[in-house]
Image (spheres, rainbow, N blue to C red):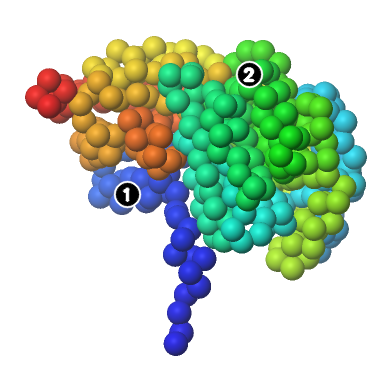
């Protein structure tokens, strides 16, 4: 009988994309919608990056190229990681991918056998459990609880490690909570990984979007070099979401496996965008610090304003560009709140369960929109808040 493979039915979509689809439908009906659902900076790359892409295209850089990525780009990434993250990696261990998601997928595909257990943060990026399930692995969540300021609890992780545990996923700063893991937590995670001989997949896509302090990569802890894959890319830090550019820094024995997967799938990443990526990393326009400075101002205003909405509680995120709002005190479910916000207020946001069961009492708002738009969003939210006020008291 003709059928779709079960690996598809065990995977799941992304809450952000389904909210986005409904928001687009409403817009097509003439409704005004403020889009705070997608994790997409409202910036574009600086002029030097665009000029570089144009130059590369005009000079015929539109061919098949090196499977692992242009050597010049891999050299530049190594220099960038040393400069911005104090980590020394060999360009030979860097593999370019069409986006971080593909890098995540292939990192997991290269290292997991069916039945292997993968520890991952809940709430967290929805791709983590979905990809694991699609590969026949078993995702095992560890909780990022508000009681613990959304930090992973190493004791919980230790208790969940079994002889089948093969990989531990970290994401700092994290989507959706904005948590930057503390040095103490990262050190404890690294010790567990060494003790139990685990792979660590460190999703560092938001490493540059920090609101204070210095970033410390998982690669900097003892014993991590041989077991850590860093996933990073250009979507967030360089506002290049649609360019589909990401990369993995892998241990020397893993990089060829990633290239093998690349040969058998995307062959190589678009050549002229890789030239532009070199200029993005050099950032002569200062685009990244300017964007992060703007996010910092929005964060301050938006978090303060959200806390004035009845029943909303939001701690300022330490990184990334999401407000993770605890809606417990509204007495209404996050799904209902998100529904009211979209249908009645025209504000698109994501109910927290889209990021895992531990997110069920939260709603995620992206603050990658102008201060004026964010301000209008909160005014609209205030107006519909009567719909849930008193609900808590009634229950
Ligand atoms: C934590 C995290 N990892 C990976 C990705 C995927 O990034 P890319 O657009 O480069 O595929 C995202 C995008 O939202 C993310 O939030």
> Does mark 1 have its CB less than 8 Å from ligand 1?
no
Q: Quadrant of the C terminus?
A: top left
Element under disc 2 = loop
Q: Are marks 1 and 2 in contact (CB under 8 Å)?
A: no
Looking at the image, which residue is at 87% across and 47% down?
Answer: 252
Above or below residue 163? Residue 150 is above
Element under disc 1 = helix
- Residue 175 shows in the view: no
Question: Residue at label 2?
Answer: 182
Q: Quadrant of residue 365?
A: top left
Looking at the image, which residue is at 61% across and 61% down?
Answer: 114
Direction from residue 282 to residue 394 in the image, left or right: left
Outermost residue toward the bottom? 1
**Residue 315: percent from left, percent from top:** 43, 16
Above or below residue 352? Residue 220 is above
Q: Quadrant of residue 249?
A: top right
* Sequence-wise first label, 1 or 2: 1
> Does mark 2 have its CB less than 8 Å from ligand 1?
no
Direction from residue 128 to residue 2 in the image, left or right: left
Looking at the image, which residue is at 46% across and 61% down?
Answer: 10
**Residue 211: percent from left, percent from top:** 59, 16
Of tags 1 and 2, the one toward the viewer is 2
**Residue 137: percent from left, percent from top:** 58, 56
Per the model, the C-alpha gap separating discs 1 and 2 is 37 Å
Q: Quadrant of residue 336?
A: top left
The front one of 188 and 72 is: 188
**Residue 116: percent from left, percent from top:** 62, 54
Above or below residue 57? Residue 237 is above
The disc at residue 22 is 1
């Amino acid at each position: 009988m003709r059928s779709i493979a079960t690996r598809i039915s065990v995977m799941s979509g992304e809450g952000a994309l389904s909210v986005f689809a409904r928001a687009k439908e409403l817009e097509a009906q003439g409704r005004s919608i403020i889009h705070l659902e997608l994790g997409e900076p409202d910036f574009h790359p600086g002029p030097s990056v665009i000029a570089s892409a144009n130059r590369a295209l005009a000079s015929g850089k539109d061919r098949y190229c090196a499977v692992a990525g242009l050597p010049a780009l891999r050299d530049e990434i190594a220099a960038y990681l040393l400069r911005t993250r104090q980590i020394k990696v060999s360009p030979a261990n860097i593999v370019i991918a069409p986006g971080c998601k593909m890098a995540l997928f292939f990192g997991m595909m290269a290292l997991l056998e069916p039945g292997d257990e993968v520890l991952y943060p809940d709430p967290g990026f929805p791709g983590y459990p979905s990809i694991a399930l699609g590969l026949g692995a078993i995702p095992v969540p560890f909780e990022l609880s508000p009681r613990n300021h959304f930090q992973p609890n190493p004791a919980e992780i230790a208790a969940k490690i079994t002889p089948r545990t093969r990989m531990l996923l970290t994401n700092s700063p994290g989507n959706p909570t904005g948590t930057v893991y503390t040095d103490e937590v990262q050190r404890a995670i690294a010790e567990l990984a060494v003790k139990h001989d685990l792979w660590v997949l460190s999703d560092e896509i938001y490493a540059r979007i920090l609101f204070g302090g210095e970033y410390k990569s998982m690669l900097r802890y003892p014993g991590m070099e041989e077991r850590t894959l860093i996933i990073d890319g250009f979507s967030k830090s360089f506002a290049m979401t649609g360019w589909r550019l990401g990369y993995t820094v892998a241990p020397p024995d893993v990089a060829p496996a990633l290239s093998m997967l690349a040969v058998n799938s995307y062959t190589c990443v678009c050549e002229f965008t890789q030239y532009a990526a070199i200029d993005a990393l050099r950032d002569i326009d200062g685009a990244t610090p300017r964007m992060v400075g703007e996010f910092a101002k929005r964060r301050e205003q938006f978090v303060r304003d959200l806390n004035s909405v009845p029943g909303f509680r939001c701690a300022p995120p330490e990184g990334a560009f999401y407000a993770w709002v605890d809606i417990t005190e509204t007495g209404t479910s996050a799904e209902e709140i998100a529904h009211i916000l979209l249908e009645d207020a025209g504000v698109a946001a994501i109910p927290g369960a889209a990021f895992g069961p531990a997110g069920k009492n939260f709603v995620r708002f992206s603050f990658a929109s102008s201060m004026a738009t964010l301000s209008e969003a909160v005014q609209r939210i205030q107006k519909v808040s009567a719909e849930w006020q008193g609900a808590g008291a009634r229950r």
